[in-house]
Image (tube, rainbow, N blue to C red):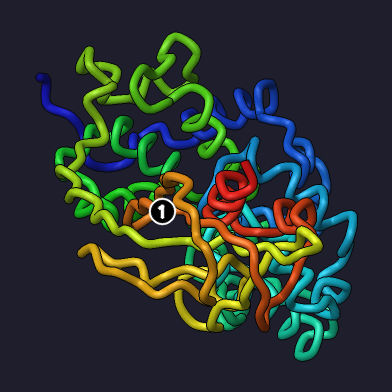
Amino acid sequence: MPPVPVHPPADLSEMRAALLDWYDAHGRTLAWRSPPGAAAPDPYRVWLSEVMLQQTTTPHATPYFQAFTTRWPTVSKLAAADDSDVMAAWAGLGYYARARNLLACARAVATNHGGLFPDTEAGLLALPGVGAYTAAAVAAIAFGRASNVVDGNVERVMARLFAVETPLPAARPELRRLAGSLVADHRPGDWAQALMDLGATVCRPGRPLCELCPLTAWCAGYRSGAPERWPLKMKKAERPHRTGTAWVLRDDRGRVALVRRPDKGLLGGMTGLPTSYWSETASAAAPPVAAEWRDLGSVEHVFTHFSLTLSVRAATGAGDFLWTDPDEALRSLPTVFRKALERGLA
């Protein structure tokens, strides 16, 4: 492999112009985005989209974003919403801690900032639940600040552009430094979104579409002849596996017994089916009430940090639960419980 640079190209302005021209012609049309070169979008919409996209894909997040902004069109409207309504609307978007942070941030903006987001990266970082990436993204896209916005797509572009030999995740500081060396005051929001779009649509994982890329003249990975080699990655540790039991209890009216989970921990504050403790070692667990329980097989679910096999048992009975119509439960429950309930109702 020929030697490759580990510093920004000398003709930075030419490279920036090439990418921005490409973005003007090929940038994605997204529900939360203003067209290239247009007035900056509503900071609320930028912030909401970035929080939603932290654990899911653009196609999956889009209908959630549209539903949220229809129901709560401003940050002040969201701040005034009931916690339970927001948690139910969030179901399927990942960890519910993010929904709790979403509400905390909205309420801080409404209460402490008059419903207006701070317009600097430092001010945004001071909000509850706002991390470095989200603060940089909102500052650049909504307020035109020259912030260094680095997500997984941008990391991949940098790794290939500079042929970075350090594997992820150890390479992240270097990739961030390289991305920062390309940031400028001219159209910083469009620059950030152009890099993200390039990574999402052209500089893709697996087989990059180099024939469509505006940066091949500067790309060390392309010159190597094997750009798909980057980014290098360390071997992932095996994801732990846990098991547990979910109980689908119905009363004589056909309603389903639900419980509210503790505020802290996985799926904290959400309603769900009664379950045992989820453990890496099999253990017997007592059902929530005495009844003639039937075994209905199991369901599988994968969380970020572990996979889960949940045995499903069903019965008819009574007790002190949140009795809910099955159709309503299927609409509002987190995905793992919806899977178990669907099995229990079959």
Identified by mark 1, the residue type is Ser
Q: Is residue 140 left or right of residue 220?
A: right
Residue located at (41% from left, 14% from top): 210
Q: Nearer the viewer, residue 114 or 271?
A: 271
- The vertical placement of 91 against 63, above or below, is below
Residue drawn 73% across and 37% down? Answer: 30
Quadrant showing the N terminus: top left
Q: Quadrant for the C terminus, please.
A: top right
What x and y, as percent, mark residue 27? 66, 29
How far from the left and from the top, in percent, is residue 24? 69, 27
Left/right placement of residue 37 relative to residue 130 reads right
Residue 147 against residue 123 in the figure, above or below: above
Helix, strand or loop under label 1: strand
Q: Residue 221, located in which quarter of the rendered image?
A: top left
For the point 23% across and 32% down, the residue is 163
Q: Residue at x 55, y 57 (%)?
A: 314
Q: Can you see residue 47?
A: no
The quarter holding residue 74 reads bottom right
Where is residue 135 shown, x and y percent of the image? 57, 67
Q: Residue furthest bottom?
A: 112
Q: Is residue 53 above or below residue 256?
A: above
Q: Which residue is mark 1?
A: 311
The image shows residue 216 at horizontal and vertical percentages of 39, 18
Query: Image height check: is 241 above or below 96?
Result: above
Categorize mark 1 by other alpha carbons within 10 Å: few (<14), some (14-19), many (20+). many
- Most distant residue in the top direction: 211
